[in-house]
């Protein structure tokens, strides 16, 4: 097998061109799993069947993930055919609903409820304390991860793993510009986590320390404390988190709701 995109190209050519274009249009060229617009192409739900009913628009990331089930040497099945079809159906429905979306309507109300849920997820100490005032960097890291999970999947948990609320993930927001703002927030939080882990060289460490349960030990925090007064790192972390708060506040303002406080001295 050649590089992944060669494979993708060959695969894509097998669908009827007109039908493939119609499916892409029905999905607004959106990846049916993550909702992104980046380099979306039609993928086979089950290999070897070129009927368009067996096609699903996916971005390269989600495509790679969906394909792990069929490549040799992999035993994990990320998505079943039924799941992929549900994702496709949800996307097609969503595009239709988006065209009918209006303020005060049913989907506006549903979107509003989700935005309030996402705002709650950002309304936590990890998005209020300046980096140099952060009490525990281990908790900070965990809070970033929990927030990402909540935005992506709608699962919001306490630190010990208890489920607080089960909503829907950001991909389910019908209003495109609102969805994109939440998407931007998740991209920024991903950046924060990446820089945080890179700085602390944590990827390896967390794997060993964290284990299957969510707990941290004091040693980890003591080690991290050495970075508390790194000005560049602190400013960057503060700017990035304030960006997420500003994006969220612009959504809350559109809905006529109170803004989040964001970073403040305490
Ligand atoms: Zn995707």
Image (tube, helix red, strand yellow):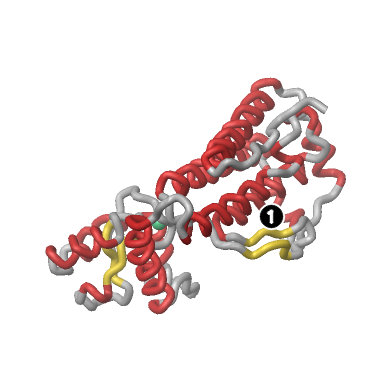
Q: Is residue 83 left or right of residue 134?
A: left
Ligand 1 rendered quadrant: bottom left
Tell me if residue 120 can be seen: yes
Q: Residue at x 63, y 53 (%)?
A: 117
Residue 72 seen from this side = no
Farthest residue to the right: give it.
218
Q: Which residue is located at x 72 percent, y 65 percent?
A: 163
Q: Position of residue 9 (x, y in %)?
A: 21, 58
Q: Which residue is mark 1?
A: 207
Question: Left or right: where does residue 104 sit relative to residue 2?
Answer: right
Please tell me which residue lies in front, 87 or 234.
Answer: 87
Q: Nearer the viewer, residue 46 or 149?
A: 149
| Quarter of the image where the C terminus is located | top right
Left or right: residue 18 compared with residue 80 = left
In the figure, residue 125 lies in which quadrant? Answer: top right
The vertical placement of 262 against 10, above or below, is above
Task: Report which quarter residue 1 is drawn in.
Answer: bottom left
Question: How many marks overall?
Answer: 1
Residue at left 30%, top 60%? 27
Mark 1 neighbour class, 10 Å CA radius: few under 14, some 14 to 19, many 20 or more: few
Give residue 153's position: percent from left, percent from top.
Answer: 56, 60
Image: 233 above or below 209: above
* Position of residue 212 in the picture relative to residue 59 (left or right): right
Tell me which corner region of the image, top left, top right, bottom left or bottom right, holds residue 264.
top right
Where is residue 235? Give x, y as percent: 65, 24
With respect to residue 117, does 13 lie above or below?
Answer: below
Name the residue: 30% across, 62% down. 57
Furthest-top residue in this view: 231
Name the element at disc 1: helix
């Amino acid at each position: 097998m050649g590089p992944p995109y060669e494979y993708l190209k060959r695969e894509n050519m097998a669908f009827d061109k007109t039908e493939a274009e119609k499916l892409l249009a029905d999905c607004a060229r959106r990846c049916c799993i993550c909702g992104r617009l980046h380099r979306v192409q039609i993928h086979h739900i089950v290999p070897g069947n070129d009927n368009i009913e067996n096609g699903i628009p996916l971005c390269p990331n989600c495509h790679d993930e969906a394909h792990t089930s069929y490549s040799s040497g992999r035993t994990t099945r990320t998505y079943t055919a039924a799941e992929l079809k549900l994702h496709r159906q949800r996307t097609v429905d969503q595009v239709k609903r988006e065209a009918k979306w209006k303020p005060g309507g049913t989907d506006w109300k549903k979107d509003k409820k989700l935005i309030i849920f996402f705002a709650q997820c950002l309304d936590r100490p990890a998005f209020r304390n300046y980096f140099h005032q952060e009490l525990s960097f281990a908790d900070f890291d965990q809070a970033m991860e929990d927030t990402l999970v909540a935005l992506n999947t709608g699962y919001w948990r306490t630190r010990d793993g208890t489920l607080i609320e089960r909503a829907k993930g950001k991909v389910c927001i019908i209003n495109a510009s609102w969805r994109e703002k939440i998407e931007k927030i998740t991209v920024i939080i991903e950046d924060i986590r990446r820089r945080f882990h890179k700085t602390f060289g944590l990827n390896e460490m967390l794997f060993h320390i964290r284990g299957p349960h969510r707990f941290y030990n004091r040693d980890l925090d003591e080690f991290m404390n050495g970075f508390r007064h790194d000005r560049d790192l602190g400013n960057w972390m503060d700017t990035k988190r304030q960006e997420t708060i500003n994006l969220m506040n612009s959504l809350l303002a559109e809905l006529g709701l109170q803004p989040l406080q964001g970073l403040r001295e305490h």
